[in-house]
Image: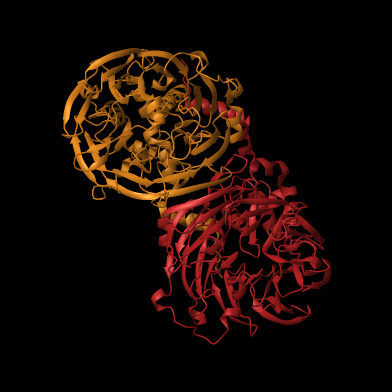
Chain colours: A orange, B red
Amino acid sequence: MQRRLLSKLITATVLAASAIAVSPIAAAKAKQPTMSEADFEKADSLYFQRCAGCHGVLRKGATGKSLEPKNTLKKGQKRLEKIIALGTEGGMNNFDDIMSKKEISMLATYIQIDPPKPPEMSLDLMKKRHKVFVQPKDYPSKPQHNRNWENFFLVIERDAGKIAVVDGDKHEIVTHIDTGYAVHVLKTVEHHDFLKAKNPGRFWYIMGRDGLMTKVDLWAKPEKMKVASVQVGYDARDVAVSGDGKYVIGGVYWPPHFVILEAETMMPIKVVSSRGVNVDGNYVEESRVAAVYDTPMAPTWMVSMKELGQMWQVDYSDIENLRIDKIDSAKFLHDGFFDPTGRYFQIAANASDKMVIIDTKERKLEAMIDVDKLPHPGPGANWIDPKCGQVSGTTHLGTGLVTVWGNDPKGNKKAAWKECYTVETDGPGVFLRTHPKSKYVWADQTKTPEPEIQQSVQVIDKKTREIVKTIQLTTKKGYAAVHFEFNADGSEVWVSIWNRSDSLKPNGEIVIFDAKTLKKKATIKGFYAPTGKFNVYNRVNHVT
Amino acid sequence: MQRRLLSKLITATVLAASAIAVSPIAAAKAKQPTMSEADFEKADSLYFQRCAGCHGVLRKGATGKSLEPKNTLKKGQKRLEKIIALGTEGGMNNFDDIMSKKEISMLATYIQIDPPKPPEMSLDLMKKRHKVFVQPKDYPSKPQHNRNWENFFLVIERDAGKIAVVDGDKHEIVTHIDTGYAVHVLKTVEHHDFLKAKNPGRFWYIMGRDGLMTKVDLWAKPEKMKVASVQVGYDARDVAVSGDGKYVIGGVYWPPHFVILEAETMMPIKVVSSRGVNVDGNYVEESRVAAVYDTPMAPTWMVSMKELGQMWQVDYSDIENLRIDKIDSAKFLHDGFFDPTGRYFQIAANASDKMVIIDTKERKLEAMIDVDKLPHPGPGANWIDPKCGQVSGTTHLGTGLVTVWGNDPKGNKKAAWKECYTVETDGPGVFLRTHPKSKYVWADQTKTPEPEIQQSVQVIDKKTREIVKTIQLTTKKGYAAVHFEFNADGSEVWVSIWNRSDSLKPNGEIVIFDAKTLKKKATIKGFYAPTGKFNVYNRVNHVT
């Protein structure tokens, strides 16, 4: 008689699967360095701000390598300090320009010690952290200022935990609003083929990296613009609105989940865990929600599951009977954008060096395109190429290249979902952007360690496919050029000068170029580390 | 300038949310009793066999209470021993008839010590544990015996880790087949409105509690019936087949997941985690898959998420773009059955004292019916009531009652999804069963501590709604009567005599009654603790 019992099975499995007995683990623990509680806390904060995005709070690695003690102890203090200071060929930034030697040393020690596991967050706790500053019944029925709010730009002021509201007609800052820390993205309701919300672009929803979500009303007086907030996690990245304007979704890194909220009040109503089994068949505890997008052709959100290598298409037409289509693709999913029709969602699987194409109408994988190292399109760019027809492009975090592919399976089947051409830039970048009226595509090089390249952007001619201009925006040490946004009529290109090294001071700038002549037109000063910019009109009408 | 940082947030949250500082935890640990490694292992095995089903491997509780040390330490050794020996009013079994005093004492100590956390299981590991005994190309093209296999009964032989194949015409055991330990359920392909598999009922798929799945071919010679096996977890309960016969799904308790396999070879192809956030908004690590069912009206499985209180309707028409509808209902979902049309799935939410009704065509919640304590319908029963029309019924684990409700929203809207009547039985039971040709509904009382009631079943008249007969099947100490199945033409009712106290010996029996006269017709001897029975014809045609 054979009984197969849990304890024996488990013992056998653990030994067979990992070949790790108890004693080596204990030995590894004994070898871990120690640090004072105060230093550990400081290092923990630094790690969260600068490292967790790529390496994970459990340090199992994702876009970055695993930083568990079993790996870091082998490297040792000196080598780790060097890597943190100078970066690596693999795509890791240098941090010697924004961290002190002491900080680098603490961080190197910290990552040789077992990571603390953060707590869960219940729906009840979120509800306790929900605040309404202006009741929906008290919202104004018309704009309380004479500005052209449809040409407002909302600008992320990264480290200060603020956004700036900027008048795009007058080139002046309207106000700074306290939000979550290091906002990654902000969103408003977008036009759908079949859903039309009232006053699109009026309300904006902002996700801080600390999981604090903020709702902003652009019709209010500047000091009244923040109308509600709620915390939905401890580490978060993205937010999206439903096409009918009823719901907001918050995508969270830790706890690994997404949260659905009533858009009107920001009251959270449903939490869905993103923990799951990845496309390789392994369970992932820290399965992060990298990005979320509303889909113009279906009442759904695209929720990208970074570590799982799956896109979850979440249907918001019935929240209590929640339909999710879990679409297998490739790891690690990061950020994406739509083709001009709004049917195909194009997202970077950065560790797989692929662009993943989802057919949001059929809710299934359409194609995967092999590209170069670590694609990162940001808000993306679509244009017409003389040979390939309708195309999209991406920058790369891992190499100085813009990759361009066909995206029109109906009109140009031959070119669809294949690389059309590439353009070599001076260095790795983060963002690419254009406008239907513009002859040019703009690419930044923010991921390049060399300062003068990091401070420069490059302009590609859509017809000749060649770089026609390189513009260095600043020469100041520790300052970088990053991210583009066009104004509502497409006549201007806005570029950020990101004061990385003194990011808590209002020394950042936005430089405005004439979209046709490529000449500098104006500068707006007084930003706290400005990075991403969101023009109301362009985002509502998904002009990419 | 305010920075909201992970470490501070976490500290604040932990302190605010639970009000537990470090020292009380350490104190609690210090208070935990100790036991030898050998005794701990024995108790761990006992716990897995007898307790984990209701209390969970992490002991956080579900149908049973939480047995974490923070709770058990308060009760202490003596009180815990008494509860294990005698059971409780709350629905917990007595174990003094099947466990020694030493075993009860060890178990009481074990549950005061922190539970060991079992490992994950990857798709790769499952593939390594996949065995093919007979290649599909070598399957016989016609039955290799002269028996009427469509009237075979497959009988679970619980503790021996076997099933028995029984000839329903000849009332004789054909063979015993080694399977997983303590099989909970076995399934074959069922008739659909729109999907018709070849030779339904030929192949059976069996899930052991140890996660071992076995495929059986009823056309083979008895010694060749086991054709493939695979382990998909360490603790599991249920299995189902797709309506087209292509896929099999295994529902697993630990790791909390379900697995999709190719039915032909039993090769696992996809793992989906069931960890999630429950209907109260709390994350559940041990979120178990209680039961899985094929749906006759859609190419989907109903997957019941015990702790989450959600039914996941999993669409198997496109495995790589896997649609799941997560239908909110109530905790803790256990087992269910269909209405006669096959549209409505009716499942017990036992801790909520509700029957949950899912509309599998619309993939949404249809209704919830308040019933008495701990409903448990097992394979369920449907019949026609003189007043309420089409009805379904359930037994209860927590009270001696059969609850009956209307299930025909089209034909009898007034009675639909409302309690129609209840029948008091002599004690709590596990299974209820009838047949369209039968005038009676049979109910067992296996959950009753009094031996003579536990050994008796009761027969209810469909017309008068009254108990017309009580049949005591055995008087032997430690033996119980359990579970019913009709034969293919509905003329016989089969009842198990479950030899609980000597379950590894072939002392169990099946007693066969004439379905009309209710008189004993035959006895088949030689079973190892027989419990559930599955008639080929009735299961293929979902006769309930």
Residue B527 vertical placement versus B12 (above, below): below
Residue depicted at 34% across the width and 37% down the height: A64
Residue A200 in the image: x percent, y percent? Answer: 46, 28
Residue A491 versus residue B280: which sits nearer the camera?
A491
Residue in the image at 39% along x and 46% along y: A309
Nearer to me, B222 or B243: B243
- Tally the marks: 0
Q: Where does residue A139 sit, x and y in percent of width and height?
A: 57, 21
> Is residue B143 something that shows in the picture?
yes
Q: Residue at x 66, y 46 (%)?
A: B66
Q: Report the residue that reaches farthest toward the bottom.
A: B146
* Quadrant assignment, res B104: bottom right
Left or right? Give the position of B44 relative to A65.
Answer: right
- Which quarter of the image is occupied by the C terminus of chain A? top left
Question: Residue B498: percent from the left, percent from the top?
Answer: 69, 70
Left or right: where A3 falls relative to A237: right
**Picture coordinates of residue A435, whole percent (x, y):** 29, 30
Quarter that holds the N terminus of chain A: bottom right
Is B29 rendered above or below residue A530?
A: below
Q: In this view, does A47 lie to the left or right of B157?
A: left
Determine if residue A157 is in view: no
Residue A57 as seen in the image, left or right of residue B307: left
In front here: A116 or A368?
A368
Q: In which quarter of the image is residue A86?
A: top left
